[in-house]
Amino acid sequence: MSGNTFGTLFAVTNFGESHGPAIGCVIDGCPPGMPLSEADIQTDLDRRRPGSSRHVTQRNEPDAVEILSGIYQGQTTGTPIALLIRNTDQRSKDYSRSAESFRPGHADYSYWRKYGIRDPRGGGRSSARLTAPTVAAGAVAKKWLALQYGTRFRACMTQLGELPIPFEHWDHVRNNPFFAPVADVAQYEQYIDALRKAGDSCGARIRVQATGMPVGLGEPLYDKLDADIAYALMGLNAVKGVEIGAGFASVAQRGTVHGDTMTPQGFRSNYAGGVLGGISTGQDLELSIAIKPTSSILSPSASIDIHGHSIEVSTKGRHDPCVGIRATPIAEALLALVVMDHALRHRAQCADVVLPLPPIPAAPA
Amino acid sequence: MSGNTFGTLFAVTNFGESHGPAIGCVIDGCPPGMPLSEADIQTDLDRRRPGSSRHVTQRNEPDAVEILSGIYQGQTTGTPIALLIRNTDQRSKDYSRSAESFRPGHADYSYWRKYGIRDPRGGGRSSARLTAPTVAAGAVAKKWLALQYGTRFRACMTQLGELPIPFEHWDHVRNNPFFAPVADVAQYEQYIDALRKAGDSCGARIRVQATGMPVGLGEPLYDKLDADIAYALMGLNAVKGVEIGAGFASVAQRGTVHGDTMTPQGFRSNYAGGVLGGISTGQDLELSIAIKPTSSILSPSASIDIHGHSIEVSTKGRHDPCVGIRATPIAEALLALVVMDHALRHRAQCADVVLPLPPIPAAPA
Amino acid sequence: MSGNTFGTLFAVTNFGESHGPAIGCVIDGCPPGMPLSEADIQTDLDRRRPGSSRHVTQRNEPDAVEILSGIYQGQTTGTPIALLIRNTDQRSKDYSRSAESFRPGHADYSYWRKYGIRDPRGGGRSSARLTAPTVAAGAVAKKWLALQYGTRFRACMTQLGELPIPFEHWDHVRNNPFFAPVADVAQYEQYIDALRKAGDSCGARIRVQATGMPVGLGEPLYDKLDADIAYALMGLNAVKGVEIGAGFASVAQRGTVHGDTMTPQGFRSNYAGGVLGGISTGQDLELSIAIKPTSSILSPSASIDIHGHSIEVSTKGRHDPCVGIRATPIAEALLALVVMDHALRHRAQCADVVLPLPPIPAAPA
Amino acid sequence: MSGNTFGTLFAVTNFGESHGPAIGCVIDGCPPGMPLSEADIQTDLDRRRPGSSRHVTQRNEPDAVEILSGIYQGQTTGTPIALLIRNTDQRSKDYSRSAESFRPGHADYSYWRKYGIRDPRGGGRSSARLTAPTVAAGAVAKKWLALQYGTRFRACMTQLGELPIPFEHWDHVRNNPFFAPVADVAQYEQYIDALRKAGDSCGARIRVQATGMPVGLGEPLYDKLDADIAYALMGLNAVKGVEIGAGFASVAQRGTVHGDTMTPQGFRSNYAGGVLGGISTGQDLELSIAIKPTSSILSPSASIDIHGHSIEVSTKGRHDPCVGIRATPIAEALLALVVMDHALRHRAQCADVVLPLPPIPAAPA
């Protein structure tokens, strides 16, 4: 209820602060009998890891995960899987001054007003570092969904600041420092370098996709699949917008265009983004998120301190000039967690439903 | 867990089908001692009601609400408030054919695959009619928040199909058939009339706002205030996108611009939309939603039936050419439900927090 | 969260007051495709109904249930099933005096202190009348469990005040005014008649049983099957104790006796009551509850009013001299709701588990 | 939903296995600003610790707790408090044989049937070792309740096997190897020594009490305070019965006796055990639990293995001859967790209630 558990039947409880002893999570509800080891989780953690390219924060964290429970002889047992990641590169410094000032665009002010106390070290609980346990839990969900249904998740950057990024091919994403679906990143590197030099930052737009989706996931009235996707992605640090399928472009579409027609061979289009009436259709899930520019910038800006006095704030230290870069694996993980939870919810209520039609193949997006 | 309850501490459980005997909801968690009568609820129901202008469905439903419980001598008692709305204008017709066909853009297909059974009468449970109990519950939340904190909710249409609607003044909205903030609606009426004549439909963009917000609402990691807002609004029928504050425009903003600076007199801008780190700052909540074009259109389109055969579908009957028109009061209600729930959650955990600063006035959006 | 919803995946939200317009509930999570009509529910409601014998309250309520939603062509659709029972025999009288006094053993005082307001008419929300919707929801769960697994529920009275009731046969219970498993009820009728004449009341002990239990229900650490059974039954009005299997007698048992030994043909005893480690073993569930004497008695007793002054209270009106008599069908319903919820929870997480042993038949209790 | 989280607003998520790397829990919802250190928690852990007297298991676990998160400068911050306890004294041995056999009275069989896989090492997840994180979380709740309301928790043994234990004084409990309220324990030591020599075990009865209770805790219909207490305590390993106040003795009481009368100075008796209508009255909470004899005994008994063949099972190793001995601090912790959760729930809904009466002092039990 205090907002640190994600999901209901596949429930992930997250803990930790940026500069505390450790971060981690407890996954409750993973079905028994699935092979699982640290290596399954580490791959995704490494993709999210700081210091992986010169365009992201240079904090040096191995983010090595330890499984504390829930596994016996290499298999899940149906009991909670606790994952622990020790913090190792917290720089000791004097936080007494930053503890009293509110950085514009940060959670400093709202935490202070909510709790009356705030861990200021590295952003404390509001740090993007806390997405690491989410990514770890997402890796478990991904593995189960891949084994069970063949569902896969991927994401890529489609806009960097003012620069739209054309979609060339998913294959480019893996080894691309921007997780961009293009071969040539020269212009994006120049753009980011110039921003950093100017002590400034920019936003990004990320596309997220799930393929091999089971049909029938999502609850009809409130816990719609798209509603829970929006919840998950809007909850990611710095996200200011979420759209499914045609998204905001659907406002100017006509009904004759937007409604995805069906043939015995499948859907002819996917403006719905894989969800109708809040329930998955079996088409690919397609969504986009907007990420705001990083708030931690070198350029000074006006603010106040906890006493209400005017101050000037400038954030030194190791920060991502565009937090959208590392958001890609996190967005995949969040989508996987939503799908996983709804897959289990669906089994509970509809395990007896004999599906009256063979799966209709998803049309190309 | 089956997705028909909204909220946790102010929990609204919705029931009913478009053409069943009744629709309604049970509100659990309303604090005791608040004056409440049917009249408090009916006002918002009437704003959402079908048949209120020639631009919306002509189904004639009085939507008269009956309070079944939870009130004693005109006051809430802290026990569940059950609200009942009888369906009165269900047209009897033969649904045997529509029961076997899947309308493009509708929930027909996904319901069929999920449950193996589907109430086809008027859209059954997936009908927009089921937003009426949500509006009724929202009216209760609105009243409590207004009395307790002075919080107010309002919404308006900012785009109708291809037509952007300039913001003139909130005062225009109340008596405007499109809930648009403009004095002159001639061009929008022509646009809708032409669409209906063409047997087509269009989408809309809606702006939603809360003023007089308490500070400190929202949980920091997963149940962020903006995450729950996105969940609530994306869950509204036909919504395909949600953005908070600067939304998708923040992608192209610089960090030096986006971060709302603070002075002892308050924030200088509101690109954050009233939320930082998932917690309300006391500024106005500002958000926008994208509503897709109505799927129920007269123009025929290709589809399949439950046996997998090709068919052609055309939806006759009483339908809104733009479901976005009546979405305005519903969007307000959903935002109110989210704020209400977080207000109670905040009291549970942080009732003892002595706020260290006087409330900072919200800057103009 | 405000305690009016029972269960998680088969969630029953209860509303209403004893003398309000109606009582009822919304069942969310019933699997689709089960035949269901009012008649399935009415049978159990009639067993619980007031006025069914001269030993219970003479309030004359037909308790006719109306299904408002969730059924199409006689089958459940997977959407919420709302059940409505209108109150018809609320006697109009002046409650202004009782509204200000606290009856010993009643919820008057604790409601007043909790909410600062209280509906005093007929006990308001704390009335045993509110068990009717629970019984109605239990009837739905019972039907599903009988169809799916062959699980059956029954209960009987095993002690009335000081009088232990020997177990003769389950067949006697159905037409027995005390729900007692005996043929001759003369001594119990004399006992109750004497109590009523003395303006006094007594307690009862009830045995509850489920046969045909699926194996594997219950969560291992906190939401154990026996823990949830205890929660359900202790939550029934007037219950002061719950025991499973050998219960309090197990304190004086030796480990060599208590541990139910197993053979290839099944368990040799059932001191565990059908639950080991919080998970059902497939044996019969066996439990007992203690019900306190009715607090509404004619004999006057000392109390205070809302101003803190000494008063004398005597409860006139139509009250059960032993509330345990009508508790039997309610206890069955509560046990059925617990088993139903855990059956769905089990399907979510363990749907893939291939059970390595054939079901072991339950040994006689 | 998978049953490893206790509570709603003060939610404790437990993880770990008896012989895995670690056990622990995450507490979500602790109010901010409370001083907290490992020492606050260690005291209660030490009372529950194995090896503390010769009458309990000789497994040698320091049970040293590490706080991983949620504390800044010695105070709670309102964010999750993760507690870690490393397992250190897991004896390496060959579990291949015990992995295939079902010990009577244990969770072996039910886990196997539920999950199809089971960690057999030291009982895995069903081990009483998993109560250590519950005790740790309970210590946090106890501290908050003591500071906020002056509420205190204590428990003592009132029966050991066939031997009733007279209540002499609470002061004897602290240094008593049986947590018994008596000065002289000679007869209990002889009793336990004889049992161990015989390779047998016995049960126990424990009384649990909370003093200084706030009024108004508990939700009226389903989540009654006594219902949640029964859930908590019945969920403790080996518990087979729970009673509140007069408990099973209330069956034979008359209404004229059981109903606790009130005077302007307070209640005259406490047969209700501190709860009326599911809501705390401010009197002491009084309850008793029945604990079954330890199932791990040296005496051989008949059973089957996972292939359905007859076997004989005898449990060697370090086991408590009466698990009730160490249950005392655990029962206190569970009661504290229930009260804590309801205290926060009450604040959410009823923070505005102005209590119309001064606190009534609890009468002697």
Image (cartoon, coloured by chain):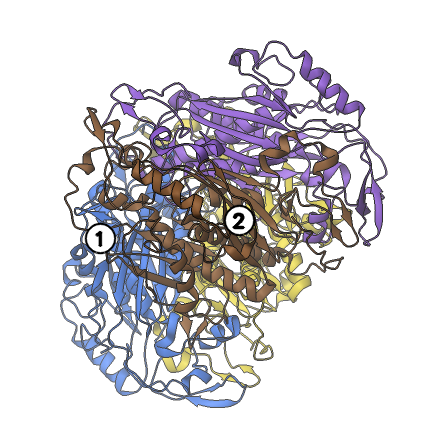
Chain colours: A blue, B yellow, C purple, D brown
The image position of residue A269, as x and y in percent, is 29, 46
Are the residues flagged by discs 2 and 1 from a single subunit?
yes
Q: Which amino acid, by three-letter code, is at mark 1?
A: Gln
Q: Quadrant of residue B1?
A: top left
Q: CA distance from mark 2 to mark 1?
A: 31 Å
Residue in the image at 56% along x and 79% along y: B356
- Whichever of callouts 2 and 1 sits on the residue coming sooner in the sequence is 1
The foreground one among B345 and D159 is: D159
Neighbour tally class for label 1: few under 14, some 14-19, many 20 plus, Cα within 10 Å? some
Mark 2 and mark 1 residues within 8 Å of each other at the beta carbon? no
Q: Which residue is mark 2?
A: D208
The image position of residue A239, as x and y in percent, is 38, 66
- Above or below, C10 against D302 in this view is below
Residue in the image at 21% along x and 60% along y: A44
- Which numbered marker is on residue A145? none
Q: Which residue is mark 1?
A: D90
- Above or below, A244 against A105 in this view is above
